[in-house]
Image (tube, helix red, strand yellow):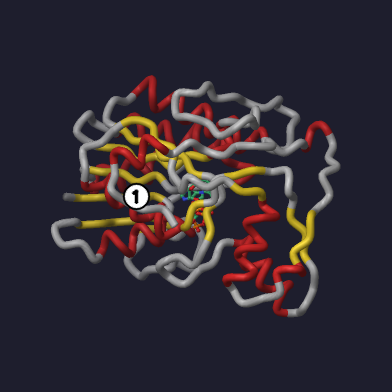
């Protein structure tokens, strides 16, 4: 089986790439964009660039594609260009595993089930670019493809397969090491998922025939404040240095309050435990 991981240089993608490389019977290739590359065999590719995308895809002819790219403020380009290039090349035999986000539920009244309606944000909202691009991508995939799995995740944390920490935990450790307090909000509720657990789910979806939309992560939902206090304790620091952050915000910067996920469906389908 041949698998292509787009975004194999990233936090999630590099974990998936590394795990897949060690599985016999799987031939894996992956892409990166910005130097340095985390593996010496990744191919440099801008997925938004049609000719090089086409050349790469035709050369690889994968059975499964893992789409683990992210571009923050330029996320819409990844949907309007990169994802569309991908969709035009996919045959019904090729399975797409698309990584999506809890931010598709930006109305913020979780915990959300897979079938709950997605919502977009006004164009002038700070988070509209990422949120609306993800919503658009999910709708496009659903309209154009049949052989796909959309895996939605909340904030992803922990040390990945190549020793990289998520930015939030990295910042936490940096502050606590210096005995400096750090604040996180108690009104923002999420389903935090460990990067190794998510990578294991993706690898499972590479190997199984399951399709459809799945919310991923543990049953437990927490605020950033609660979660980061726990993380501080686990890392051996003084958790009292983690304080409650201000909940004041401007209307166009309002963060979706509760985007936690109901993850019963994936737990029923897979025999994997989320920590
Ligand atoms: N991190 C989270 O908390 C979180 C939460 C929910 C969902 N997700 C989703 O999970 C997926 C992976 O996220 P992540 O945290 O691993 O992100 P990440 O570390 O930023 O990795 C994303 C990768 O995308 C690549 N990329 C960006 N633009 C590209 C382009 N035009 N062409 C080719 N590659 C491009 C980058 O390559 P280079 O590094 O080589 O530049 C980067 O490695 C994304 O779909 C994201 O929306 C993440």
* Disc 1: residue Cβ within 8 A of ligand 1's nearest atom: no
Instruction: Answer above or below: position of 44 versus 111.
Output: below
- Percent across and percent down for residue 268 are 31, 38
The picture places residue 235, in percent across and down from the top left corner, at: 59, 74
Front residue (pair 148, 159): 159
- Residue 213 as seen in the image, left or right of residue 257: left
Check disc 1: other Cα within 10 Å, few if <14, some if 14-19, many if 20+: many
* Nearer to the camera, 242 or 134: 242
Residue at point 31%, 48% (across, down):
56
The residue shown at (51%, 60%) is 34
Mark 1 residue element:
helix
Q: Quadrant of residue 149?
A: top left
Q: Give coordinates of residue 61: x percent, y percent.
A: 22, 44
For the point 34% across and 49% down, the residue is 202
Residue that appears at 25% across and 36% down:
210
Q: Taking 168 as reference, is 258 above or below it?
A: above
In this rendering, would 245 be left or right of 65? right
Q: Quadrant of the C terminus?
A: bottom left
Q: How far across and how far down the image is residue 48, in percent?
A: 47, 41
Name the outermost residue toward the left: 25
Total tally of numbered discs in the picture: 1
Residue 58 relative to residue 17: left or right? left
Q: Is residue 265 left or right of residue 106?
A: left
- Circle 1 residue: 201
Residue found at the far bottom of this picture = 178
Tell me if residue 164 comes above or below residue 221 in the rendering. Answer: below
């Amino acid at each position: 089986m041949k698998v292509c991981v787009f975004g194999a240089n990233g936090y999630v993608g590099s974990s998936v790439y590394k795990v897949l490389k060690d599985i016999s019977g799987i031939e894996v290739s992956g892409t990166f964009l910005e130097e340095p590359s985390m593996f010496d065999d990744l191919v440099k590719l801008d997925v938004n660039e049609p000719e090089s995308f086409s050349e790469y895809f035709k050369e690889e002819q994968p059975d499964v594609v893992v789409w683990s790219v992210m571009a923050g403020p330029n996320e819409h380009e990844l949907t309007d260009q990169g994802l569309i290039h991908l969709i035009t090349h996919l045959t019904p035999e090729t399975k797409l595993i698309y990584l999506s986000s809890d931010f598709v539920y930006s109305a913020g009244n979780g915990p959300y089930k897979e079938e709950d309606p997605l919502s977009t944000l006004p164009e002038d909202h700070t988070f509209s670019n990422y949120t609306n691009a993800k919503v658009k991508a999910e709708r496009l995939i659903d309209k154009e493809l049949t052989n796909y799995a959309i895996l939605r995740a909340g904030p992803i944390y922990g040390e990945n397969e190549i020793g990289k920490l998520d930015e939030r935990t990295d910042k936490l450790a940096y502050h606590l090491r210096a005995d400096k307090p750090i604040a996180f909000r108690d009104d923002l509720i999420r389903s935090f998922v460990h990067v190794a657990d998510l990578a294991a789910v993706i690898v499972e979806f590479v190997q199984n025939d399951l399709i459809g939309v799945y919310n991923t992560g543990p049953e437990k939902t927490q605020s950033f404040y609660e979660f980061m206090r726990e993380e501080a304790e686990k890392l051996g620091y003084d958790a009292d240095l983690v304080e409650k952050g201000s909940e004041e915000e401007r209307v166009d910067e309002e963060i979706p309050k509760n985007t936690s996920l109901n993850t019963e469906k994936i737990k029923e389908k897979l025999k994997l435990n989320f920590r």
